Amino acid sequence: MSTEITRGVARDAAAAGDRLFVQSLAKAIALLEAFSGSPAPKSLSQLAERAGCDRSTAQRMAHTLIALGYLERTATGLVPGIRLVERACDYLRSNPFIERATPIIIDLRRSTTERVDFSVFDDLGMVFSIRQPSKRETFVATVIGRRVPTFCSSGGRAVLAALPDARVDDIIRRSDRRQYTPGTKTTPAEIWKEVRKIRQTGYAIAVEELLPGEVSLGTAVTEQDLPVAAIHVAGSLSEWSVADFAAKIGPLAMEAARALSR
């Protein structure tokens, strides 16, 4: 997904004749983003294909990135390098919303005893930047940096509800609206129905839309009346009814979002 975004931006810049846009840098970033869909080690040919460049270009860029520590060579192929973790740390430390959100998210996790995530709004996706897992979580559910779709995640839908109608239509139109589970709502009419509900209740509920067996509640965090982030609280349908989850978690999540909004 990240590679597709970068390649799309690069194509748009080329079409617009943007002289300040460095296409070679975009290709290097696309090379790093080739691991976003699958963490498995990659060959040079695989990196070239995913980055949209020839093998010779991929080889030169990979050599440079290895020397700088942004790629590492293993016995089975190339993998992301440790320097990327340092850059993630730079982002987290420089974002004032994440700094302010951390104690609030920790408190919300304590009061709900469920997984609580904080995501940053990035157009078609929500990027998890703080994650407070519950006792039953898998490794994947604890890792920051994961991107989930705006159109079908609870936090993403809460963000949509806080946007002007024209922006909602634009995001729905450009989203891939993939069917992640049998419960994923993918049509514009279904998504708009949820958005209207959220505008009434103040929170979003997503039932098995991204993961089977999961109910998730989301609230938008705003800055100057526009959404910039979201809080997600996730529980198991084996432990909660949707109504009980909304009744208990909704007020707590909305209070946390209000405390963060400016």
Image (cartoon, rainbow, N blue to C red):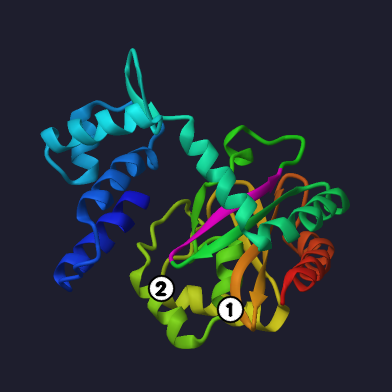
Q: Quadrant location of residue 45?
A: top left
- Please name the residue shown 77% across and 55% down the image: 105
Confirm whether the magenta stretch covers residue 13.
no
Q: Give the range drawn in magenta.
A: 124-132
Question: Which label is found at residue 196?
Answer: none
The type of residue carrying mark 2 is Ile
Instruction: Determine if residue 217 is in view.
Output: no
Instruction: Determine if residue 149 is in view.
Output: yes
Question: Which label is found at residue 161?
Answer: 1
**What x and y, as percent, mark residue 1?**
36, 51
Give the secondary structure at mark 2: helix
**Residue that numbered label 2 is attached to:** 172
**Above or below, comparing residue 185 to residue 114 in the picture:** below
- Please name the residue shown 43% across and 87% down the image: 166
Crowding near the residue tagged with mark 1, few <14, some 14–19, many ≥20 C-alpha atoms within 10 Å: many
Q: Quadrant location of residue 232?
A: bottom right
Q: Nearer the viewer, residue 137 or 215?
A: 137
Give the secondary structure at mark 1: helix
**Above or below, comparing residue 168 to residue 243 in the picture:** below
Confirm whether the magenta stretch covers residue 126.
yes
Q: Is residue 68 left or right of residue 100?
A: left
